[in-house]
Image (cartoon, rainbow, N blue to C red):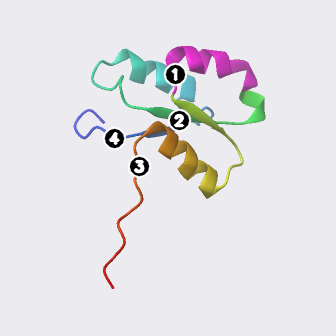
Amino acid sequence: MERALPDLILLDVNMPTMGGVEMLTLLRSNPALAAIPVIMLTSPADYGVMAHLTALGTNGHLMKPFTAATLIEKIRAVINLAPAPAKPA
């Protein structure tokens, strides 16, 4: 990530090797990565960590399951995503 900074990170709270909270903590503690917007993917079971995620500086969250339209809406709210220009006929 440090070589090619992403515009946005979608991060699931529940991951197999390193939890999303731990990963978010690492991202926010690294000056080169701290400003990257992060949208957390959560489930109802993650309610207990929501305040902690907010304190760590998430830019939003999506409750699973979600639709593609909801994902795009959330991404547009976090980064300036303009619709693709129309292709000439």
Q: Residue at x 55, y 29 (%)?
A: 20
Tell me which amino acid carries mark 4. Pro
Residue carrying label 2: 39
Residue carrying label 3: 81
Q: Nearer the viewer, residue 59 or 13?
A: 59
Judge depth for marks 1 and 2 and give the one in front.
Answer: 2
Q: What mark, if any, has residue 22 been given in the picture?
A: 1
Dot 4, how many residues are within 10 Å of its Cα: few (below 14), some (14-19), or many (20+)?
few
Tell me which amino acid carries mark 1. Glu
Q: Is residue 50 above or below residue 9?
A: above
- Mark 3 lies on a secondary structure that is loop
Judge depth for marks 3 and 2 and give the one in front.
Answer: 3
Dot 3, how many residues are within 10 Å of its Cα: few (below 14), some (14-19), or many (20+)?
few
- As measured in the structure, the alpha-carbon distance from the residue carrying label 3 to the one carrying label 1 is 28 Å
Q: Which residues are magenta?
A: 47-58
- As measured in the structure, the alpha-carbon distance from the residue carrying label 1 to the one carrying label 2 is 14 Å
Residue 23 picture location, percent across and down? 48, 26
Q: Residue at x 48, y 24 (%)?
A: 24
Query: Magenta span has 55?
Result: yes
